[in-house]
Image: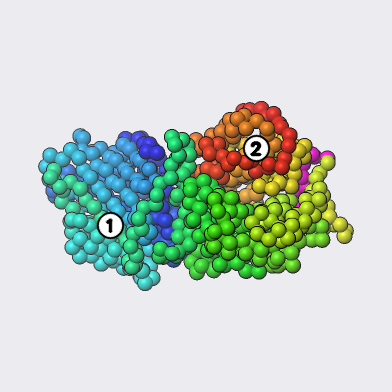
């Protein structure tokens, strides 16, 4: 996709939209079409020091000026930033900007100045290393001129802001090379021509309105690390600069593009998928992983595993999928796949009850994708990890995770939230869901059935099937006759179990998984309930609007936002299971495909808004369903890519289910 996003030419600049470039190891560049940074995470080079984490904002921006004569004097600004205490952007480069384009491989800004001179600034990231390339081209020159470039740097952790002017941020320059150092790290800026002047000064009070909207601190200082002055002429009107975090890394070859036969939507989704796939360390043998969301998330277990079919298998990248699973398997502890990794020290956190079950589901998806899965030694090792998970869950493991006598899965301890609804306020889970969450037993049943298909020993397979049969028989305890849907949770009550009747989307997994717990009429009723209470054009709400605890707008400070995160906020990734559920209950494949396109189209169209070519993490539950959270979220993209009907798997996920349904237009 290569569309103009900011054809202002004197109109107010575009701060709302964003663009994203990635380097395949967790580093990225991100900003707005106007060039103004509106988040602490924005920058022309955000490096991953310890791939894919430990991100450092190296080059925040450059302040560029075009001088129409060879001497400094009259000039045209080619930059725009925002400063606290003023609603007027400065410099006023936005007044001359006529275009912005981003195709996920590069970003290009265009200005027209001085009666017809066109200046283009292009940014690209090298793959597999922390390096960016900047190129300025000037067309329409008839005499000598000059370009001056002032890099603004902070060399800080990308979660932090420079509220002061640290003494350890130092810059030195000579000839065509400038070096900036801080915290033992060095960034090198090297130009093809011109001369660096080592004059440094601090620019104060940059203002980031998107941080202010999130209730965060939102102003900082940045160091102007020097001035690059480049003479230009009609015969030599291109300026190039390479910016690198100093390290012994070589660029990786570009990844192979996997495109469909003429399906424009599938191709756009494939491009979006690629931005999330990274390496967990340096080197050719490093396992693949998935950045859960840009700009602030690292690689999360649950997110990566749910995303795997859409990011990898749908894009014909099975070997990388198996590599990713091997990386997570190597960090398993007591049968639990890591929930997430620390963003600086690579420490693993294990507070999750469902990541291990999604791991089994992902291994089975890889198993089904291979012509001869038994010949893959790496896959067979993953099957052994699945056995380890099942054994640990049966005997009981951390965070109260264990299989009860009835075959249903119990999980949770005070102070923790171990399902995907894991927001916490003051150390307490907002939606802790301690007890027997409905989706955990659905995933457990599915996992047992998946493992039964993957093991070679018939007796072992039969044993897993028998355990699954007990779970499915007991699953009826989740049925809420009064509401014709599933309880979201069974909670201990006076020596028994009582159902939590709140209507949430978790019950969808009892219909949508490869091996569903619910079939026939009950499956149809669950889908009807989700349609009537939870479905929006951008995903499913996390709580019915009829519930007194429903919160329809994700706004305010972080505490207020966390309280609404899973209490009404819409999540696009849930559209994938919803589409699977539609397939499971339908006998009309053609009609279901048409309905799925109708359902997914608003999310596909949203790729032209927000962050170019990407899909946001969450949306308001209330109309007009504004986008929030990470502007580029892996499982949002992955589940739309997997579910898009251009290349559906031959067998619907609920092949055991019978019965059809008739759906009206549900996006009216």
Compare residues 249 and 668 and report the one nearer the observer: 249
User: Which type of secondary structure does the marked residue at label 2 adopt?
Assistant: helix
Examine the structure image and report whether residue 299 is included in the region drawn in magenta. Answer: no
Magenta: main secondary structure equals loop
In the image, is 269 to the left or to the right of 620? left
C-alpha gap between disc 1 and disc 2: 50 Å
Compare residues 160 and 508 and report the one nearer the observer: 508
Q: Residue at x 68, y 32 (%)?
A: 587
In the image, is 119 to the left or to the right of 158? left
Question: Which stretch is magenta?
Answer: 482-489
- Residue ranking furthest to the right: 494
Q: Which residue is mark 1?
A: 242
User: Which type of secondary structure does the marked residue at label 1 adopt?
Assistant: strand
Q: In the picture, residue 168 is in which quadrant?
A: bottom left
Label 1 with label 2: CB-CB less than 8 Å: no
Compare residues 198 and 476 and report the one nearer the observer: 476
Q: Which mark is residue 583?
A: 2
């Amino acid at each position: 996709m290569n569309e103009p996003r900011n054809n202002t030419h004197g109109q107010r600049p575009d701060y709302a939209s964003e663009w994203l470039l990635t380097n395949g190891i967790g580093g990225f560049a991100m900003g707005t079409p106007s060039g103004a940074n509106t988040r602490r995470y924005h920058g022309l080079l955000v490096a991953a020091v310890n791939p894919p984490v430990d991100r450092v904002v190296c080059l925040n921006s450059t302040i560029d000026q075009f001088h129409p004569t060879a001497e400094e004097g009259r000039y045209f600004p080619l930059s725009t930033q925002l400063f606290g205490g003023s609603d007027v952007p400065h410099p006023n480069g936005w007044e001359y900007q006529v275009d912005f384009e981003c195709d996920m491989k590069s970003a290009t800004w265009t200005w027209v100045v001085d009666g017809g001179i066109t200046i283009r600034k292009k940014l690209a990231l090298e793959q597999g290393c922390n390096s960016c390339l900047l190129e300025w081209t000037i067309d329409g020159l008839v005499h000598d001129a000059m370009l001056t470039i002032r890099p603004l740097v902070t060399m800080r952790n990308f979660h932090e802001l420079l509220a002061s002017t640290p003494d350890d941020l130092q810059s030195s320059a000579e000839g065509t090379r400038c070096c900036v150092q801080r915290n033992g790290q060095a960034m090198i800026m090297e130009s093809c021509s011109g001369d660096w002047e080592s004059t440094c000064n601090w620019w104060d009070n940059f203002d980031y309105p998107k941080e202010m909207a999130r209730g965060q601190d939102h102003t900082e200082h940045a160091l102007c690390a020097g001035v690059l002055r480049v003479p230009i002429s009609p015969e030599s009107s291109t300026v190039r600069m390479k910016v690198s975090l100093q390290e012994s890394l070589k660029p990786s070859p570009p990844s192979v593009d996997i495109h469909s036969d003429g399906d424009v939507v599938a191709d756009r989704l494939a491009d979006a998928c690629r931005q999330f796939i990274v390496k967990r360390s340096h080197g050719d043998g490093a396992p693949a992983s998935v950045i859960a969301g840009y700009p602030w998330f690292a690689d999360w277990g649950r997110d990566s595993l749910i995303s795997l079919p859409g990011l990898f298998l749908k894009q014909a990248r099975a070997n990388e999928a198996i590599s990713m699973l091997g990386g997570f398997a190597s960090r398993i502890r007591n049968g639990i796949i890591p929930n997430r990794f620390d963003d600086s020290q690579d420490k693993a956190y294990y507070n999750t009850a469902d990541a291990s079950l999604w791991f089994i589901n992902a291994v089975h998806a890889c198993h089904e994708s291979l012509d001869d899965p038994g010949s893959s030694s790496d896959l067979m090792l993953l099957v052994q990890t699945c056995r380890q998970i099942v054994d640990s869950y049966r005997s009981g493991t951390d965070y109260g995770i264990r299989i009860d006598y009835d075959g249903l899965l119990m999980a949770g301890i005070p102070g923790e939230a171990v399902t995907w609804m894991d927001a916490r306020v003051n150390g307490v889970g907002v939606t802790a869901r301690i007890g027997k969450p409905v989706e955990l037993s659905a995933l457990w049943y599915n996992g047992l059935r998946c493992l039964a298909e993957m093991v070679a020993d018939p007796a072992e397979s039969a044993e897993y099937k028998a355990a699954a049969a007990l779970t499915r028989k007991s699953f009826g305890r989740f049925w809420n006759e009064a509401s014709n849907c599933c309880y979201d949770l069974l909670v201990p009550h006076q020596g028994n179990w009582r159902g939590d009747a709140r209507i949430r989307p978790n019950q969808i997994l009892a219909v949508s998984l490869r091996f569903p717990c619910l079939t026939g009429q009950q499956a149809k009723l669950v889908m009807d309930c989700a349609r009537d209470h939870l479905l929006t054009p951008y995903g499913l709400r996390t709580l019915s609007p009829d519930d007194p605890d429903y919160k329809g707008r994700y706004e305010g400070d972080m505490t207020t936002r966390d309280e609404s995160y899973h209490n009404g906020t819409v999540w696009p990734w849930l559209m994938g299971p919803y589409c699977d559920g539609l397939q499971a209950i339908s006998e009309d494949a053609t009609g279901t495909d048409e309905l799925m396109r109708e359902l997914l189209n608003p999310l596909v169209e949203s790729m032209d808004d927000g962050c170019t070519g990407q899909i946001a993490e969450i949306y308001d539950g209330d109309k007009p369903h504004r986008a929030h959270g990470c502007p580029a979220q892996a499982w949002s993209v992955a589940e739309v890519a997997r579910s898009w009907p251009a290349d559906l798997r031959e067998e619907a996920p609920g092949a055991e289910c019978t019965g059809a349904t008739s759906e009206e237009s549900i996006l009216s």
